[in-house]
Image (spheres, rainbow, N blue to C red):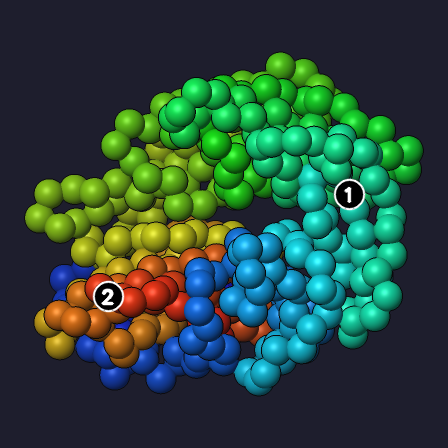
Amino acid sequence: MSALITAGLSAGCGGSSPAEVTPDLEGCAAAWQEIYGPRPELAPNQILAHGDHLYFNDTSSTTGNTGVIVSVPALGGDATLVSPDTGAFLWAEGGNLLYAPWGDRLQAVPFSGGATMLLQDGGFCGARIGGTCDGVLLDDAFLYFNSFTPTGQGPGGDVVFTRMSRAAGTDEDLATLSGGAPTSLTRLAGDSLLVFLAGRGYVIPRAGEQPRALADQPGGGVVGLDDQGLLSSWLLPAATSAMKRTPIDGGPLVPLWSEKPARFRPAVVSPDPAGGWVVTGHEPFADGATHVSVWWLDARENGRRVACHAGASDAPGSSSDLPGVITVGSDAIYATVNHLPSTGSPSWGIVRIARSD
């Protein structure tokens, strides 16, 4: 991403200091383009942008919350079935969409849909009784998955991180972490897996060495991961917040985006492959209501507000909008938003925000 104007120079999508001036919806609401939804249930764990379509696991048309894999045009339109299988995490490889219907079973299907191809099956998860088993990360040589066995009546248990060889189908345990449940907050970072589990960050070397715990962040809520560590949001007095990074090298927490508008509360952060980050969260606007807004940060942590949702998130009788996953494409940002009404069932949708850098 090219250098962006600094956070101190934009109130809407342009203007004066957002840290001091309450923004107006007119400056950013036009960039918020809803291209899919609302759909029942909650948003998927991931959206994959490939070509001129988006791919994801949709649970809204199935029973049991397992889902099917569908695609929608990146500019908006109806969903098309790609596979009747479920696949919470998806990857693009050649002309195929790769997915794991369960932990150590890797399958492929053409992006246009069609016959499913079995690429490899380690056999452990398919024969497992009880607990969960989810494939979450993929590289050229391995599929990484976690399996969870609950202990007692509480939410805790042992989460085992394992890799399956794509060539041989053999499974190799990398680490066992206790005290929590599986998480989708995982990332391949250099020669390691970066994991957030049970309120703590861990680095799990891919070579099988012992995992390392990162610095504790009591009071902070983790909102994303990048190659340098955990990204967290901290609530402060007077309805303000700050961001910090937990470094992947095990060092102490450091400030992040020090020029962030004080009353903007980050909810989800995703690194931009071109450099920098995309941040979604909640922010008070000049109409007196709180709205979901979207910010771009460059690599120097200079930011600008690029979109906002005209619908209020805190009006009486309205739904509370909760930002979901972010996918950063070459020409647009795609983000999911969960709509959580005060009464009734939740729903979700996909928003497109054109890039202007």
Does 46 sit above or below residue 12? Answer: above
From where the camera sits, is residue 6 visible? no
- Distance, label 2 to label 1, CA atoms, is 39 Å
Identified at 66% across, 64% down, the residue is 69
Q: Is residue 71 above or below residue 302?
A: below
**Residue at mark 1:** 105
Residue at the location (13% across, 70% down)?
Answer: 316
Name the quadrant containing residue 138: top right
Q: Secondary structure at mark 1?
A: strand
Instruction: Name the quarter where the N terminus is drawn.
Output: bottom right
- Neighbor class of circle 1 (other Cα within 10 Å; few <14, some 14-19, many 20+) is many
> Percent x, y for residue 263?
19, 56
Q: Residue at x 31, y 43 (%)?
A: 233
**Residue 335, percent from left and from top:** 47, 66
Label drawn at residue 343: 2
Mark 2 vs mark 1, foreground winner is 2
- Type of residue at label 1? Arg
How far across and how far down the image is residue 306, in percent?
38, 71
Q: Mark 2: which amino acid?
A: Thr
Element type at mark 2: loop
Q: Residue furthest right?
A: 168
Give the residue at x 70% y 31%. Answer: 128
Vertical arrangement, residue 7 with respect to residue 137, above or below: below
| x, y percent for residue 94 | 84, 61
Q: Nearer the viewer, residue 196 or 176?
A: 176
